[in-house]
Image (cartoon, rainbow, N blue to C red):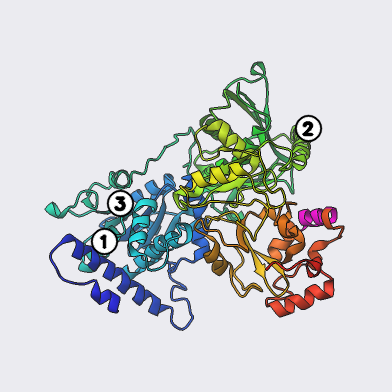
Amino acid sequence: MGVLKSLITNQDDIGAALNAGLATAVGAEIIEGLKYVGGEDPYAGDSGIGFVPDPIIRSLGVPLVTGDIPGVAVVLGKADSAADVAKVVKDYQSKGIMTFMIGGCIEQALEAGVKMGLELRVVPLGHDVTSVIHVVTVAIRAALIFGNIQAGDLAGLLKYTKERVPAFVNTFGALDPVVVSAGAGAIALGFPVIVDQDIGDLQVPGALEAVTNHDETAKHSLALRNIKIKVKELPIPVAFAAAFEGEIIRKADMKVEFWSSKNTTCELVTMRDAAQVEDHRIVVDGPDIDSGDTEYALATYIEVYGAKMQKDFESVIERKIHAWFNYMEGVMHTGQRNQFRIRVSNDAYDKGLRMKHFGEVLYSMIMDEFDAVVDKCQITLVTDPEKAKKVLDEEAMPAYSARDDRLNSMTDESVDRFYTCILCQSFAPSHCCVVTPERLGLCGAVSWLDAKATKELNDAGPCQPISKEGCTDEVKGYYPDVDRMVHAATQGAVEHVSLYSIMEDPMTSCGCFECICGIEPFSNGLVVVNREYKGMTPTGMTFGELASMTGGGVQTPGFMGHGRHFIASKKFASAEGGIARIVWMPKELKDDVSARLNATAKELLGIDNFCDMIGDETIAEDAESLLSFLTEKGHPVLGLEPLM
């Protein structure tokens, strides 16, 4: 309250007004915080969600830095017409904008048929205007998580939110004093406010502007934050946007399904000679989804030609099928290769979606995103069960096996270069990933082959080659060019990086990591925890508390963010004993990585079923109980040198 009062001076100038806006934000946070006293969720049963936890903010990191979420809209108030709210929100949704809603506009949008949920990027926060603080804290915690801004650094915080959080505010309906003051707080954070009321000469260009024509609201708002949307117009009868990627289609809402558990499925991209590919040829070989059945086979067979196309790019293109199909409103895709499920909703079917439209999506997106290496592309969608089985057996499975053999044979020693990845620098300016064959990006989304392809597709892009010449320490993984490239990429913030040590100059972390590993002193081992895990770890810290030590581009000896697949790598903390240091991880994570980790342990340690020696939350959540379990199992960590 003392801070709040100090910000209110009643002086007649813009600086004092913005400070009063920040005071309103402080007041809103106090009021909302009080709602949570007692431990019960004050938003239970409400259409809003209230407080947005750290794991959700971290989950937004990757799509924000890659541009899949190009901006953040805050929609506040109650419009004169529900149709106006729906028009603006659907416009944002079609462009992939993350939209947070506060006030009566929530019900108005629902009445007008707007689908809501975090997975659809339209998130209702609450009906009281004070609920706006829950999106303000998202911006502030983004600065703390991704930007290494220290608590108390107000100037650094405001600079970060203005320059790196692409947010803006739209108000609907009459402006009362609290809404006006909340808007001043948004402007202080660098977020322009666009109102739908005529405010005459009270407008402040670039900060407070009026747009009374709702057809222009989204366009004007994006322009104020310099958010450029590359709109992809596709010849399909449903909306196409990244906002629909998380859409869940329940069985009751499903028209048809392609599922590997019931029918043959596979997805394959293969390169061909120019004469073998007829550009934009789309063939549906078998029954279409309007034939009366509800379950179908599907072999998605994509043949491409390009003067610069490489065999290694096939799997990179193939992995994008998952995202592209999910971008279609009313389509849900999970899995990959020959193990996937696709559901088409009744609504999408009624709008006219058919198999040829799946082909149009694939063709358009391949020719758009991979135009640097693909010159011609043809699509065959095989729904005939026998023909689909033939594609699987004769084309897909041999290709998958050949790729796996190649990937399994690739090691850090077998290639002549590594790659940087600075995709996350838009949020974490002092972070730079070093991607190697045995260590993918810590977000889990960028492999060495992905980085290689990215360099080929965009020569000046986020992934640049690193020479391996002149290695000064093979055990810890010190390379002169790694230091040089990381130092340059982080604008001098990071001097040295070791690739294989967690104790000495570990790689930085942005905040988008899938997992964190950290020292557990009692056992002399390492705990690994994934962001989905909500409980306590034997380190005495939750994922969020561990993340606060490792995110934002800092180097924290003994703690490091990484991808799931890195856990089973032979290079995992190899300078300190490698996977033999792993003593605990959540059961879901352990089950997920067990096959690969057990295989690595058998090869390196000569131990069968190594994961049975690793604790989880069903065995121990405290250090003493964990040590007793490890002793009982004879875990190899007990014979290793102390980490500290």
| Left or right, residue 95 beside residue 220 | right
Q: Compared with residue 539, is residue 597 higher up or lower down, i.e. above or below?
A: above
Q: Residue at x 74, y 70 (%)?
A: 615
Q: Position of residue 142 (x, y in %)?
A: 44, 59
Q: Position of residue 120 (x, y in %)?
A: 48, 53
The question of residue 575 being in magenta is answered with no
Q: Which one is in front in this view, the residue at disc 2 or the one at disc 1? A: 1
Nearer-N-terminus badge (2/1): 1
Q: Which residue is mark 3?
A: 84
Q: Compared with residue 521, is residue 450 higher up or lower down, i.e. above or below?
A: above
Q: Secondary structure at mark 1?
A: helix
Q: Which residue is mark 2?
A: 390
Q: CA–CA distance between discs 3 and 2?
A: 52 Å
Q: Residue at x 58, y 21 (%)?
A: 279
Query: Within the image, what quadrant is residue 453 found in?
Result: top right
Tell me if label 3 and label 2 are in contact, CB under 8 Å.
no
Amino acid at circle 2: Lys
Q: Secondary structure at mark 3?
A: helix
Residue nearer the viewer, 497 or 445: 497
* Part of the protein shown in magenta: 594-603
Amino acid at circle 1: Gly
Residue nearer the viewer, 567 or 573: 573
Q: Is residue 41 visible?
A: yes
| Left or right, residue 123 beside residue 521 | left
Residue nearer the viewer, 128 or 23: 23
Quarter of the image where the N terminus is located? bottom left
Disc 1 residue crowd, few under 14, some 14–19, many 20+, Cα 10 Å: many
Q: CA–CA distance between discs 1 and 3?
A: 20 Å
Q: Residue at x 28, y 60 (%)?
A: 188
Q: Position of residue 160 (x, y in %)?
A: 37, 56
Q: Which residue is mark 1?
A: 183
| Left or right, residue 349 beside residue 70 | right
